[in-house]
Amino acid sequence: RRHTRYPLVTGVQTCALPISGKIGADSAGMNLRQTLVQLAEQSGAKDLAACEQAVTAAATDQRSMVNALLDTGQVDEKVFAQKLGERLGLQVWGEEIPPIPAPLREKFPARIALRYRLLPVTPGEGEPLPVLGFDPFDHLGRQALAGFWSGETRWMLAPRRAVLDGLR
């Protein structure tokens, strides 16, 4: 199967997504929009038509489908982040979001963090910088960070509310 590789951080990691846009081995012919709606249902959404409409409109307008889905208020964001992480094989941040210490705040580009809603977390000794986000398909945000942050990163999913609260 052919894949397109999107560099996440130059020279550090890549994320392979099938050219067909299908994700996960058990998607069985589902496209990304259908998969997101299915994950919304698994995350407590009752009005699947509203979820599908939001995701389709976002795709048509070239906006974030994940953000549009979360904006419907239909899904439990914690459950959705966990389900999406499981489907994509991404680690999900499950702890409380700690405050960003001043040295990290000074090093991490604030305009990238706020514009793309990416939250740095203090790394352990000798570990890459954990960067939390709620939309794993935000390639523009990842590329923007790669242009400013030369260190190694570890991308992780987190519930949107947790990321937004952490950026305050």
Image (cartoon, grey):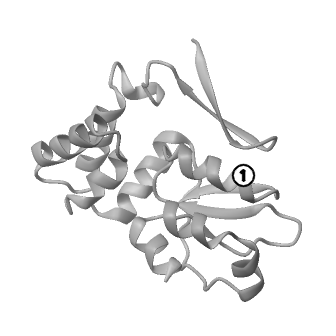
Residue 4 vertical position relative to residue 35 in the rendered view, above or below = above
Q: Quadrant of residue 102?
A: bottom right
Numbered disc total: 1
Residue in front for this viewpoint, 118 or 127: 118
The picture places residue 112, in percent across and down from the top left corner, at 59, 63
Q: Is residue 142 left or right of residue 138?
A: right
Q: Which residue is mark 1?
A: 147
Q: Residue at x 36, y 32 (%)?
A: 32
Q: Quadrant of residue 155?
A: bottom right
Q: Position of residue 121 (x, y in %)?
A: 66, 73
Q: Residue furthest right?
A: 126
Task: Identify the residue at image location x=60%, y=83%.
Answer: 98
Quarter of image, res 79: bottom left
Q: Residues within 10 Å of mark 1 (few under 14, many from 20)?
A: few
Where residue 40 appears, as percent x and y from the top left, is 27, 49
**Residue sitting at x 21%, y 40%:** 57
Residue type beneath disc 1:
Gly
Vertical side of 23 occupied by 157: above or below? below
Element under label 1? helix
